[in-house]
Image: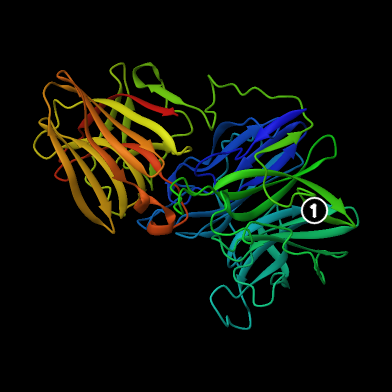
Amino acid sequence: MNKAVNPILAGFYPDPSICAVGEDFYIVNSSFSYFPGLPIMHSKDLAHWEQIGNVLTRESQLPLGTEEISRGLFAPTIRYYKGTFYVICTNVTKGGNFVVTSKNPEGPYSEPHYLEGADGIDPSLFFDEDGKCYYIGTHPNPEGCKYDGDWYIYIQELDIVNFKLIGEPKNVWNGAMKGVHWPEGPHLYKIGEYYYILHAEGGTGPDHAISVARSENVFGPYENNFKNPIFTHRHLGKECPIKYVGHGDLVKTKNDEWYIVCLGVRPTHGYTTMGRETFLAKVDFEDNWPVVNCGVGILTDTVDVNLDVFRPESEKNPVPNTTKNYDFDKMEELTSDFLQIRNPVKDSYKLTKEGLLLKFGKDELTDTKHPTFLGIRQDTKNFRFRSKLDVSNLNNGKRAGICIYQNSKFQLRFEATDKEVNIILVTEGQETEIDTYPIWGNIVSLCFIVSDLTASAMVKTEQGTKIIKENIGLSSLSTEVAGGFVGCTLGLYAIDTDAKEDEYALFKYLSYERD
């Protein structure tokens, strides 16, 4: 017996979709306007995971434009059929709904097959026993939306060879509750004699929930489960330690046991800085209906899984929920957990024997353009995030440093020039210089020490180590204040708005220590 600890993917891993192939499990998550897109996680026991790559690694696969960070890729689904992995997703910035394929789960994946006539968002695929493939997604009420979130779930057959929708779309369900807001993230399954639609409703915030319907025919009519919603935390009050629970996807193990992955958040005093995370729960079937965490009805801290313990190849693949130390001078390539903001500029970084060379970008982190930024996900409430950089060329307007990034209007930066370091809090797009400190020498270490919703900024130079500022408030970097769908990322950046040629800032390492 193995124990999974919730969340199984801590930090910014929203909208999980899962599939099983033999003894292996794969999860993909939304990544919005970060590049590369859609992280791919692998496990053999549902408890221990490793990141084996990203689905969309080329700009041709992922045009992101210049919109805010919570645009881009919404709610992917991963499925496997006869030797091929299919990932379907919505790029709300450009292109709409698309499918990419690969023979290998880690990729590389094909160029996107955009689906003409597939309106709406949150698509999923279902392969029936007769070989037919069906598209299920959501779109506005065809009779006209009577309120915000008045949408319908629809099903249509998909020609998976030519990636063309065929036949007519069939509106099959608009949620379990009367006047439901945002029926979304639907998945279609055939289990026993029934087809099941599992979907989220109530929006992605405090009223989020999972509901289910079933039918003996793929196009319905679908029967509502009178026990809906079958899983939610919305009835547990504002002080519940896990909130926003919803957006589930079912998976069956080799032992014919069922589980569900879903999203949730872990706020601190009502504020969520890590974003929506991936949780696991057990599923049983009673009277041909799924029951989540039977006898408990809410997420549990641990989940018993009847599978042998899996040990990820931590030296090869990034492992979520762990301390990370990246010595750039020893790396030949960046690991797959690194993120950039939107489509990066050409040659935005280089790995050398000296360390990481990060190109000075012309765009500010407060722009919705293409700043030079390399980051990882925040996945715990208490941590130390630090980096060492060479400041000898940070003159004539050049700046570099570390950042806790929520979006272009909400962020905390620790910024260096060749003469000083500055702590800058950005709220509602307005920059406030919290403190400044003179420095000496060419090598400087910058560190944020974060405890729940406060941060301290510490600098180390040839003159010694000093905490410049304590108790910097971070509640503004939460989704409750900043809005959007993402969690904070922790990144390195380099800026020169007047850059006329390729020049680079030198970073020695990035360290992320979980307390």
Q: Which residue is mark 1?
A: 291
Whether residue 279 sits left or right of residue 349 in the image: it is right
Rendered residue at 46%/28% (across/down): 335
Is residue 284 rendered to the left or right of residue 445? right
- Judge whether 212 appears above or below 475 on screen: below
Residue 305 seen by the camera: yes
**Percent position of residue 499, x then y:** 16, 41
When asked about the image quadrant of residue 90, the answer is bottom right
Question: Where the C terminus falls, by quadrant?
Answer: top left
Residue 318 vs residue 447, the one in the foreground: 447
Residue 423 in picture, x, y percent from top left: 21, 41
Q: Amino acid at mark 1?
A: Val
Res 369 seen here: no
In the picture, residue 145 is in which quadrant? bottom right
Q: Position of residue 286 (x, y in %)?
A: 88, 54
351 or 392, which is in the foreground? 392
Residues 368 and 3: in front is: 3
Q: What colour scheme has been applied to the protein in the rendered image?
A: rainbow
Q: Is residue 80 above or below residue 222?
A: above
Tag 1 secondary structure? strand
Q: Name the quadrant of the N terminus.
A: top right
Q: Residue at x 60, y 68 (%)?
A: 182
- Left or right of 476 in this view: 13: right
Instruction: Count how many numbered circles sit on residues in the image.
Output: 1
Q: Residues within 10 Å of mark 1 (few under 14, many from 20)?
A: some
Residue at x 53% of width, y 32% of height = 321
The picture places residue 325, in percent across and down from the top left corner, at: 41, 23
Q: Is residue 85 above or below residue 198?
A: above
Q: Is residue 57 left or right of residue 431?
A: right
